[in-house]
Amino acid sequence: MTMITSDTLAAPRHDGHSGFLAEIRSFWRQFFARAFDPYRPELHYMRGPGPACRAKQMAISPQVQVMLTEIRAAKAQRASASL
């Protein structure tokens, strides 16, 4: 998502409307540049655990795996009881 911020306006020029029109033009130019920026970082974030995480979990000793299974089951039981 693109965030649009507004900066404070520069001091008005003494030559009349040209400074005001330049500010408006500058605002819209910045607005369109930010609003239609093709860079979308959320598309590049990794979603969920990958193969390295799975390999690490498989390397855990069987006793620890049993304990983790019991803890997950107890959490699931608590969650279903609270609903």
Image: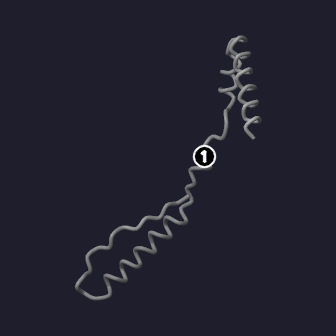
Q: Quadrant of the C terminus?
A: top right
Rendered residue at 32%/85% (across/down): 18
Rendered residue at 32%/88% (across/down): 17
Rendered residue at 50%/70% (across/down): 32
Find residue 4 and report its horizontal and vertical position in percent.
47, 64
Please tell me in which quadrant of the rendered image residue 20 appears: bottom left
Crowd tier of the residue under label 1, counting other residues whose Cα lies within 10 Å: few below 14, some 14–19, many 20 or above = few
Q: Which residue is mark 1?
A: 44
Seen as rendered, the residue at the extreme bottom is 16
Seen as rendered, the residue at the extreme front is 82
Q: Amino acid at mark 1?
A: His
Viewer-proximal residue, 34 or 72?
A: 72
Is label 1 in a helix, a strand or a loop?
Answer: loop
Please tell me whether residue 29 is drawn above or below residue 41 in the rendered image: below
Q: How many marks?
A: 1
Please tell me whether residue 39 is drawn above or below residue 7 in the rendered image: above
Find residue 66 and report its horizontal and vertical position in percent.
74, 15
Rendered residue at 29%/73% (across/down): 10
Viewer-proximal residue, 15 or 58?
A: 58
Q: Quadrant of the N terminus?
A: bottom right
Seen as rendered, the residue at the extreme left is 14
In this picture, residue 4 sits left or right of residue 15: right
Q: How is the image coloured?
A: one colour
Find residue 77 and report its horizontal and vertical position in percent.
76, 30
Find residue 53 and report its horizontal and vertical position in percent.
66, 27
Please tell me in which quadrant of the rendered image residue 73 appears: top right
In this picture, residue 1 sits left or right of residue 51: left
Please tell me whether residue 82 is drawn above or below residue 6 in the rendered image: above
